[in-house]
Image (cartoon, rainbow, N blue to C red):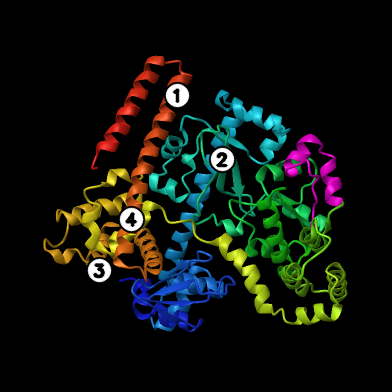
Amino acid sequence: MDEVEQIKNKIDIVELIGQYLTLKKAGANYKALCPFHTEKSPSFMVSPDKQIYKCFGCNEGGDIFNFVMKMENLEFVEALELLADKAGVELPRKKSRPQYQAEKDKKTQLYQINNLSAKVFSKILMEHKSADIARKYLKRRQINNETMKQFNLGYAPQKKVLRQFLADRGFSEREIQEAGSPDKFFKRIIFPINDIQGNPVGFTGRTLDDKIQPKYLNTPETTIFHKSHILYGLDKAKTHIKQKNESIIVEGQMDVISSYQAGVKNVVASSGTALTADHLKILLRYGPNISFSFDQDEAGTMAAKRAIELAISTGFNVKVVVLPAEFKDAGEIIEKDAKLWPKLIKESVNAIDWYFDQAFAGRKKFSGKEKKEIAKKLLPLIKIIPDKVEQEHYIKALSKKINTPEKIIREALQRVTRRQIKEKISDYDTKQKSNDPITPEENLVGLLLIYPEHLSLVMTKVDYLDFPVDSLTAKIYKFLESCYTKSDCDTKDNKCLTSEKIFQYLSKKLSIDEVKKVKFLLLEIETMSEKATKEEIISDIRQSLSRIKQTKKDRIKIDFAHKISLAEEAGDRAQVKKLLEELQYAIKQKEQKKN
């Protein structure tokens, strides 16, 4: 047993985290307010059985080492040494370094995969005939070749060439998956997402074919790509932000690229997620002024309001770039009149003035209830204004707008507590930073691992081939099949069909990382199903089963659509006809199978 395992065996995660947080019993687990984001109701869970923690608000999770690294802002080796002291485990320095080095080597490997992928995508865009459609789109958006090269834009063609390219250079399929599966993109313009040093850590792929959904496909979270900490374009914008003493936040990657080309280079966007407090803390390092330019729709307005509150709380001086009504976003303005964009930025308005305009838009007279609702929206914002003179200005403005004495406004403002402000902002932040939803496949295998007495409900309805190819859920379900039929268990009696026994046997067949993922999944499902009745559990299993069948059918259609599209491009009508017949047969077989 190595030192890491010795430390884990000697330090109980509940006792450790209890030294930092107030934990309360919640069924088999413990819960607390998350220390990594502000929230008003506990979403931070600790499992004594699995010796892990997970926040279902901000998605932070891990073991005792992850917790200490996050709480104390330590590297792994530093956390290892700190916990070794706590556990009384002797930790020779010569033994701690190789593990630290292995961690660094893994990250280097992921950077290499993403860097090579970006180069392949870029070369295809700039040189290959298959990228004609992408070059035409970018030309229509007024993006020139120099800008394409500056942002390393690329194109993923219909023919998937990247996996073999990476395999030829010694990278395994698993390593490619750990890098976020950059080979999954096809028929999409590729926007490499760089970290602050300019290293590609992920990608966004924009489809140019309405039949291919979703419109934007992003790299999932990886060891080197954390959406809440990455701002698109910051590697290029950081110097300009310092020079201008201002950050400009737009909603999309094309907005960033168009703005940069138009000469406004202190501009960034979030990457595949809403703007977070972590994003703003990073930007605050470069300067205290920020302007927002979000899309002119309801979602954009809501995002702007949330961002304003979050930015003021973070310590920024905040403005809003007001777009003319006929334009949807910054990119559209620049495409039609590049000179108008810097002019609008120069004319940006104070964010609280903009917020007031939104609150009073189209209104002149107010009922008592409407006055109360407006005050409820604006008072927390006024409360967090750091400058007392400015705060006084908006107290008077609100008093005048709703025709209410200043004394009443001040009394109401005094009743607005810091806790209320934090909770209001936290509500936004928690909603935006919540986990990706559990897939039907994850939900099904998770429920079956926790409640194996219901295996008989599904074993004659689907098999592991109905799950995504080579996925962890397929591997787990295949194991459950074998365990159910007693063909691959360490015991042949019914004792095998207990949650503890099944997980024990399953752990022997999975990698360390896979076991960790399963533990997180089980903790989440345990939390969600804690008060569920037997009938509700069975209903949940059947719903997941139905969705898996439908997803499998959809995957068959997508696979055939890809093959048919290739045959159509080749002008092979006979092959098209054959594929259509095969598609119909496959769907028919799927419907008949295991009904």
Q: Which residue is mark 4?
A: 444
**Secondary structure type for disc 2:** loop
Q: Which residue is mark 2?
A: 215
| Disc 3/disc 4 C-alpha distance (Å) | 17 Å
Marks 4/1 in contact by CB < 8 Å: the verdict is no
Quadrant location of the N terminus in the rendered image: bottom left
| Disc 1/disc 2 C-alpha distance (Å) | 21 Å
Mark 2 Cα within 10 Å, few/some/many (few <14, many 20+)?
few
Q: Is residue 465 above or below residue 440?
A: above
Give the residue type that dot 2 points to. Answer: Lys
Give the residue type that dot 1 points to. Answer: Leu
Q: What span is colored magenta in the figure?
A: 319-346
User: Which callout, 2 or 3, points at the residue further toward the start of the chain?
Assistant: 2
Q: Which residue is mark 1?
A: 566
Mark 1 Cα within 10 Å, few/some/many (few <14, many 20+)?
some
Q: Which residue is mark 3?
A: 500
